[in-house]
């Protein structure tokens, strides 16, 4: 690059110097030549007048001597002629051998009484002369000055001009080299900068804005552009990241394709939904094979308006509502809204209503039947009437328990039930339960006994935890044979407090254990109803313990008994709180 700039600069300098030299040669040298010529002419005119004056006062025989003397004094050839043009005397040649001079332009003027002047090549000597003639009585005199002097001066001036031009060229050469080096250095900085920007390094700067010339201005402008570019890029990157975070935090799966239907992006949920992975850069069909989903994306791409389809993936047991919408660049974005949870909740709700209806129908039918019998006067027997009324009362009580339990469950589940959490010792909770329920156990000839306890504190609401114990102990009393023992207690295990209620009854078959805490789930329906169970006791236990941030589980050995355990987190001690 340096060489190219150098050649251009030098060519430019060369041109300027050449044009200046030619212009100087044409104007200055010519003017100088003209002025020199005028000077010589003026000088010669004065001398010829003096020559004429000398000749005027002299006799013809003195003419040759005057001619010679004047020639020597003026440094010019002196000639005297008659009015007929005959040469009388000449300082350089023999007058007898000289031709008639009447027709020479300067003599023509002088013989008419004026000063005559002419420059031409001499016939006699063959070089350029300036001739000036003046009139004398009966003739004229003339001085001839060789113009070779002017030519010599002229060629000297020309030589000097060429010499100084060459010197100027030399200086130009050095200047061009220096200037090209300085310029190319700065341009190289701009080139390096441009290459960095092209390679995507937007933090690159020229830093060549040191001088306020055009290059400096270009460098400053480029720096400003790069800074703005970096800023804009940063903003774009930031909003892209924000958008990505938003899309990744969505519960819906999002997948986008380009104009050719190739996958360009998918959010985290989408990756989770597809265990075989999302094939970025490949056609959508390689990632999602569902025909309905592909149809929705194709429809959106073709029509330019959003299309919605319901899609179910039987293999994964999921169903989705897919909305595919066209993107400005020609691609499509598909949003998969997982309907599985909604459908599951919907089913749970339907099942629950069916269960409740079923649970209520049995006692209601019974009440209705016996009431109608009584109204119709179906029995006159007083003891039968008493029995019927007793059955009606029992069923009404069952309905009352059921609605009571349903209300409790609804309150706990909905969060309507207020929990007053406080740091209480595990021992106090266990003792409270034993105290209030031991009488109930005794009525069935059973012994309720605390076998283990701890002073560790838990964060708990006394009332609801008491309800938990009541439900578990109630079950133990109901399902274990009379006369057996029901044990309860608390222990610290793995950083949590484990409360347990243990009985030595028939136990629960293991296949029932996972579903035991579901609403209305019963191992033995008849037995449960017989003993006045609603099938909601353990569901209430589960929800209350969950609200405490704890877990509940059941373990059992057939024929030996069952153990129900609920774990509550240990309360943060005041000292630990202060440290935190
Ligand atoms: P229920 O009101 O029928 O007792 P629960 O929700 O309290 O309803 O219990 C659900 C079912 O779990 C009961 O019907 C019973 O079959 C079984 N069950 C609960 N506790 C025990 C236990 N201690 N021993 C044996 N079976 C039990």
Image (cartoon, grey):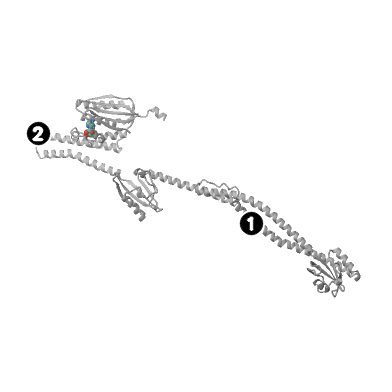
Query: Which of marks 1 and 2 precedes in the sequence?
Result: 1
- What's the CA distance linking mark 2 and mark 1? 138 Å
Q: Is residue 439 left or right of residue 374?
A: right
Q: From the image, state whether disc 2 or disc 1 is nearer to you.
A: 1
Q: Quadrant of residue 104?
A: bottom right
User: Which quadrant is home to the C terminus?
Assistant: top left
Residue behind mark 2: 382
Q: Give the secondary structure at mark 1.
A: helix
Q: Give the side of residue 37 with respect to residue 416, left or right.
A: right
Quadrant of the picture in which ligand 1 is shown: top left
Q: Which residue, as the protein is rendered here, is positioned at the far bottom?
A: 84
Question: Which of the two residues, 87 or 417, is positioned nearer the viewer here?
Answer: 87
The secondary structure type at the circle numbered 2 is helix
Q: Position of residue 51 (x, y in %)?
A: 86, 67
Image coords of residue 296 (percent x, y): 33, 52
Residue under numbered circle 1: 12
Q: Is residue 66 above or below residue 336?
A: below
How dense is the environment of label 2, judged by Cα within 10 Å: few (below 14), some, or many (20 and up)?
A: few
Q: Nearer the viewer, residue 120 or 109?
A: 120
The image quadrant that residue 245 belongs to is top left
């Amino acid at each position: 690059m340096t060489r190219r700039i150098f050649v251009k600069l030098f060519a430019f300098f060369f041109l300027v110097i050449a044009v200046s030299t030619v212009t100087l040669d044409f104007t200055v040298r010519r003017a100088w030549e003209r002025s020199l010529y005028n000077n010589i002419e003026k000088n010669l005119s004065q001398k010829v007048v003096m020559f004429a004056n000398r000749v005027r006062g002299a006799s013809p025989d003195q003419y040759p001597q005057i001619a010679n003397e004047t020639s020597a004094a003026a440094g010019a050839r002196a000639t005297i002629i008659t009015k007929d043009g005959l040469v009388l005397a000449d300082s350089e040649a023999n007058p007898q051998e000289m031709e008639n001079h009447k027709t020479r332009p300067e003599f023509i003027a002088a013989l008419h009484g004026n000063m005559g002047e002419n420059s031409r090549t001499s016939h006699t000597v063959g070089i350029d002369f300036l001739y000036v003639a003046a009139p004398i009585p009966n003739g004229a005199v003339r001085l001839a000055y060789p113009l070779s002097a002017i030519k010599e001066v002229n060629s000297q001036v020309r030589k000097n001009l060429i010499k100084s031009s060459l010197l100027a060229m030399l200086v130009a050469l050095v200047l061009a080299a220096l200037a090209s080096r300085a310029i190319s250095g700065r341009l190289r900085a701009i080139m390096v900068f441009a290459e960095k920007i092209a390679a995507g390094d937007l933090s690159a700067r020229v830093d060549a804005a040191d001088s306020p010339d055009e290059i400096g201005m270009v460098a400053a402008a480029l720096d400003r552009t790069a800074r703005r570019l970096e800023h804009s890029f940063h903003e774009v990157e930031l909003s892209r990241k924000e958008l990505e975070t938003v899309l990744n935090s969505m519960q819906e799966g999002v997948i986008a394709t380009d104009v050719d239907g190739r996958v360009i992006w998918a959010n985290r949920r989408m990756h989770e939904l597809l265990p075989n992975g999302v094939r970025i850069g490949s056609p959508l069909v390689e990632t999602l094979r569902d025909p309905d989903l592909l149809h929705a994306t194709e429809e959106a791409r073709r029509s330019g308006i959003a299309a919605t389809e319901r899609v179910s993936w039987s293999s994964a047991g999921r169903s989705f509502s897919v909305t595919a919408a066209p993107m400005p660049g020609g691609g499509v974005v598909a949003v998969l809204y997982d309907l599985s949870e909604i459908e599951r909740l919907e089913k749970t709700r339907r099942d629950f209503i069916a269960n409740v209806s079923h649970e209520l129908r049995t006692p209601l039918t019974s009440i209705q039947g016996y009431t109608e019998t009584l109204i119709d006067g179906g029995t006159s027997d007083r003891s039968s009437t008493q029995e019927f009324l007793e059955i009606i009362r029992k069923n009404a009580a069952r309905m009352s328990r059921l609605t009571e339990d349903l209300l409790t469950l609804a309150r706990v589940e909905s969060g309507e039930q207020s929990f007053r959490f406080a740091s209480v010792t595990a021992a106090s909770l266990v003792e409270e339960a034993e105290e209030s329920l031991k009488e109930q156990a005794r009525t069935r000839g059973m012994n309720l006994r605390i076998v283990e306890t701890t002073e560790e504190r838990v964060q708990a609401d006394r009332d609801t935890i008491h309800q938990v114990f009541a439900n578990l102990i109630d079950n133990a009393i109901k399902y274990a044979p009379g006369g057996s023992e029901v044990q309860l207690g608390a222990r610290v295990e793995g950083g949590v407090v484990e409360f347990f209620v243990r009985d030595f009854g028939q136990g629960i078959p293991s296949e029932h254990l996972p579903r035991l805490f579901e609403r209305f789930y019963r191992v033995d329906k008849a037995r449960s109803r017989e003993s006045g169970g609603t099938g909601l006791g353990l569901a209430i236990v589960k929800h209350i313990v969950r609200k405490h941030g704890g877990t509940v589980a059941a373990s059992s050995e057939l024929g030996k008994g069952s153990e129900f355990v609920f774990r509550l987190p240990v309360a943060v001690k005041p000292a630990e709180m202060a440290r935190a």
